Image (spheres, helix red, strand yellow):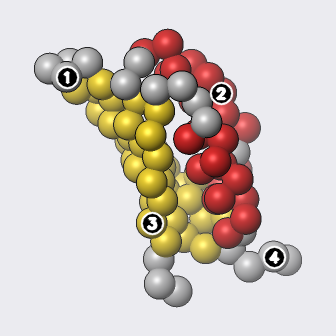
Amino acid sequence: MEETRIAVMSIIVEDRDSAEPLNQLLHSYGSYIIGRMGLPYEKKNISLMSIALDAPENTIAELAGKVGNLPHVSVKTTYAKR
């Protein structure tokens, strides 16, 4: 079995039209997602998301790349030290 890493992916969605493709993408990686939290911030018309993952490092990087390629979506990933 491939070794996995724990990571948290922070996502900012600046256009609601990008929310549906993002949700479909996250659904396709659902087996690696420990939990997720989404916060709409109406004052700035953006959404903030936090995704906790337990996955092989290359899978996390692949997901982050796909998320970052969505229009009006920013992503940063932080990994646990162990």
Q: Residue at x 73, y 65 (%)?
A: 58
Give the quadrant of the N terminus: bottom right
Which circle marks residue 4 in the picture?
none
> What residue is shown at x 70% (from left), y 53% (from top)?
62
State yes or no: discs 4 and 2 in contact (Cβ < 8 Å).
no
Q: Nearer the viewer, residue 53 or 46?
A: 46
Residue that badge 1 annotates: 44
Contact between labelled residues 3 and 2, with CB atoms less than 8 Å apart: no
Which badge, 4 or 3, is on the more N-terminal residue? 4
| Three-letter code, disc 1 | Lys
Using the numbered discs, state the Cα–Cα distance from disc 2 to disc 3 in whole angstroms. 22 Å
Residue at 38 percent across and 37 percent down: it is: 12
Image coords of residue 68 (percent x, y): 56, 41
Residue under numbered circle 2: 24
Which percent across, then down, holds residue 40? 29, 26
Report the residue marked by disc 3.
78
Give the mark, 2 or 3, whose residue is nearer the N terminus.
2
First along the sequence among labels 1 and 4:
4
| Front tag of 4 and 3 | 3
Q: Nearer the viewer, residue 73 or 79?
A: 73
Report the mark closest to the observer, 2 or 3: 3
Foreground residue among 60 and 27: 60
SS for callout 3: strand
Q: On screen, 18 above or below 53?
A: above
Tell me the residue that label 4 is attached to. Answer: 2
Q: CA distance from mark 4 to mark 3?
A: 20 Å
- Secondary structure under tag 2 reads helix
